[in-house]
Amino acid sequence: MMAMIQDLVRHKWHANAALISAIGQHDGAAHDEEMLKLLHHILIANRYWLYLILHKEFVREEEARIPDGLDAVIARYKATEAEELPWLAQCREADLDGMLHPESPLLGGQDFSVAQAVMQVCLHSVGHRAQCASRLRALGGTPTNTDFILWLKDRSAAAWPV
């Protein structure tokens, strides 16, 4: 299972970067408030679960602030990737069985394994990337292909816009 988790997380970062690059190439999408909200939502969900895994404090008030513009969003994505990939590189199969205890009324006090949390982040981001791609298309832009199966051919790293 470890290899699949590693692939899913690495693909997530590749797909996030590819989508954000496509958004950045369309001025209307890059400045669209709804798009920024969706991108921010993907990010804070990722950070919430990552911080639970890393035993770091998640300061909801700070995290809830939507960054000012796409460049700030990109910086936060890159910073989060820089926190997650070193953890992923040292993570072992046994670590995936560790239990997390999220404090959220939405989750009703249920505990989740690290593997379940990582899967949640990956699947959650897929759904919202699809929303972003639809929004980009509606604004006249062209989303890029972010299919997992196509990514497997070369397993390229995230290529963030400069």
Image (cartoon, helix red, strand yellow):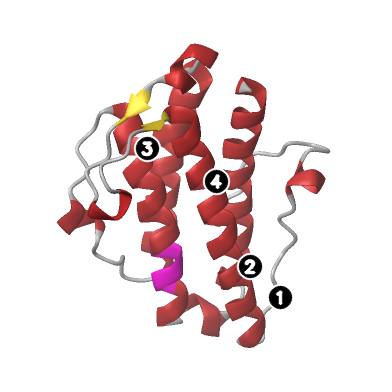
Q: Mark 4 highlights which residue?
A: 122
Give the camera-side residue of 62 and 128: 128
**Left or right, residue 67 beside residue 112:** left
Residue found at x 74% / y 53%: 147
Q: Pointers 4 and 2 in contact (CB under 8 A)?
A: no
In the depicted view, which residue is nearer to us: 79 or 96?
A: 96
Which residue type carries mark 3?
Leu
Q: Position of residue 156 (x, y in %)?
A: 71, 39
Q: Residues within 10 Å of mark 2 (few under 14, many from 20)?
A: some
Examine the structure image and report whether residue 38 is included in the region drawn in magenta.
Answer: yes
Main SS class of the magenta portion in the image:
helix
Q: Secondary structure at mark 4?
A: helix
Residue range corresponding to the magenta coloring: 36-40
Amino acid at pointer 2: Ala
| Mark pair 3, 1: CA separation | 30 Å
Q: CA distance from mark 4 to mark 1?
A: 23 Å
Q: Are marks 1 and 2 in contact (CB under 8 Å)?
A: yes
Identify which residue, 41 or 153, lies in the foreground: 41
Which residue bears the numbered disc 2? 22
Q: Split into 4 quadrants, where in the image is the N terminus?
A: top right
Kindly identify the residue that appears in the image at 35 percent across and 54 percent down. 44
Q: Residue at x 33, y 34 (%)?
A: 111
